[in-house]
Amino acid sequence: MLDVVVVGAGPNGLTAAVELARRGFSVAVFEARDTVGGGARTQELTLPGFRHDPCSAAHPLGANSPAFKAMPLERYGLEWLHAELPMAHPFPDGTAAVLSRSVAETAASFGPRDAGVYRRLVAPFLPKWDTLVRDFMSLPLTALPRDPVTLARFGLAGLPPSTWLTRRFRDERAKALFAGLVAHVIAPLDGIATGAVGLVFALAAHAGGWPVARGGSQSISDALTAYLKDLGGTVHTEYEVKRLDDLPPARAYVFDTSPTALARIAGFGRYYERYRYGASVFKVDYALDGPVPWTAKEARTAGTVQLGASRAEISTALRAASREGRAPDVPFLITVQPSVVDPSRAPDGKQVFWVYGHVPNGWTGDLTDPIERQLERFAPGFRDRVLARATAGPPELAAHNANYVGGDIACGAASGLQLLLRPKVSAFPYSTPHPAVFLCSAATPPGPGVHGMAGHNAAKAVWRRLRQP
């Protein structure tokens, strides 16, 4: 009999498997698709030689992840590549605010009225970032906080809505950039704890950058898999699990799946019926005949580029997708340009480009034209660089990854109390009605992102269970 069976070979499932194998448990992973990775995969979606990331592409939380930092993943091929600027936020007039590794450079890009405000906002937390991120991403109580005072100060600053926090800024540049940071969790800007979301992304950029993985996001999953195999674990692909009886006997079962899929497989009935899935995205992967012709020079050297002319424009787009059930007329876009630092992703002189805008859950329309109008607004002549494009709306995203219910790439709405307490209001979010069954997906704390911390935290719960006589 195995000690642990993990269902789902996404970053959280693989991290949970590694953590348990490191502790000497026998572990086997079962994945329905023909390759590991979940939301961290790389494929030729457009033309031969152009390697795209179907979901995640830039990894501020991965590079800062306490779980990943504790593993020798570089021995297994994982290399973080950092663009000159982690992120740029251009404006229609050709200028840009930036999120730099340097706090001073970032503050200066906001203008004199907000530079000091920003420095004072991040100053209490950046020197203690390593401890803070571990405490923040280990909540709820899978581990006692190492610095409860700093964590409490962070909570006081970040628990209110981001709209409260941005009132400190006087000019649009800082407000828009910070609103864009919050939008990465696909939640309205006025939700509880959205201030913390913006702060985490900003601090992550200063402390560890917003890198891409050399060769694509698949290299993260491949490194975790190779490490797991060296620890004695096994991985089985093309193995769809429809019920617990499909799996070999084990002392514990860990699911890197959506809560509703787990309930269906394990026979939990309506246990997760109140769990909410959020807005989706419409994603386009481009093969380009050269770099994006950004008007703002800062965007040309940035790994990630946010496109929203103002906080109001960003808020309107998020509200349309999340609350009004419609696609925004002017989408807020998150774009990543891996080829800025990784020429191996495309043939010589060519580039891959990654972009999405927000749409309602389950939406079946086509956002390509609004996306490209927005791109042309900040990069005139963009369409002339397009060699090929691959589009994916909510139905295609859900077909690509079963955890993306209705196309929700966060595996659950990251808004309201569910941003902090997921999948249920519980001090034991990784446990389920069955004492031997656990959940470790992005539907558990600390939530979405390729960082493995949900798997890390769930592995602790499993380990404690298996230690019991």
Image (cartoon, grey):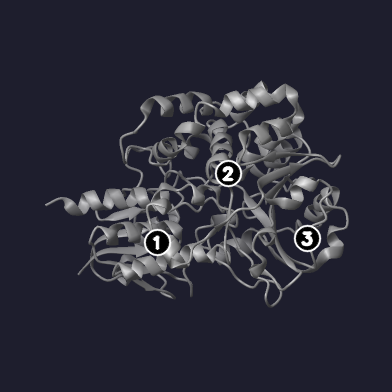
The picture quadrant where one finds residue 73 is bottom left
Query: Is disc 2 in contact with disc 1, using a CB cutoff of under 8 Å?
Result: no
The spot of residue 95 in percent (x, y) is 81, 39
Q: Amino acid at mark 3?
A: Pro
- The numbered dot on residue 291 is 3
Q: Residue drawn at (31%, 70%), measured in percent from left and top?
A: 247
Q: Is residue 268 visible?
A: yes
Instruction: Give the number of the mark in front: 3 or 2.
Output: 3
Categorize mark 3 by other alpha carbons within 10 Å: few (<14), some (14-19), many (20+).
some
245 relative to 388 in the view: left or right: left
Can residue 170 be spotted in the picture?
A: no
**Residue positioned most to the bottom:** 48
| Element type where label 3 sits in the image | loop
Residue 14: mark in rendering: 1
Q: Depth check: 157 or 120 in front? A: 120
Mark 1 nearby-residue class (10 Å; few <14, some 14–19, many ≥20): many
In the foreground, 120 or 389: 120
Where is mark 2, residue-wise? Answer: 185
Quarter occupied by the N terminus = bottom left
Residue 384 in the figure: left or right of residue 213: right
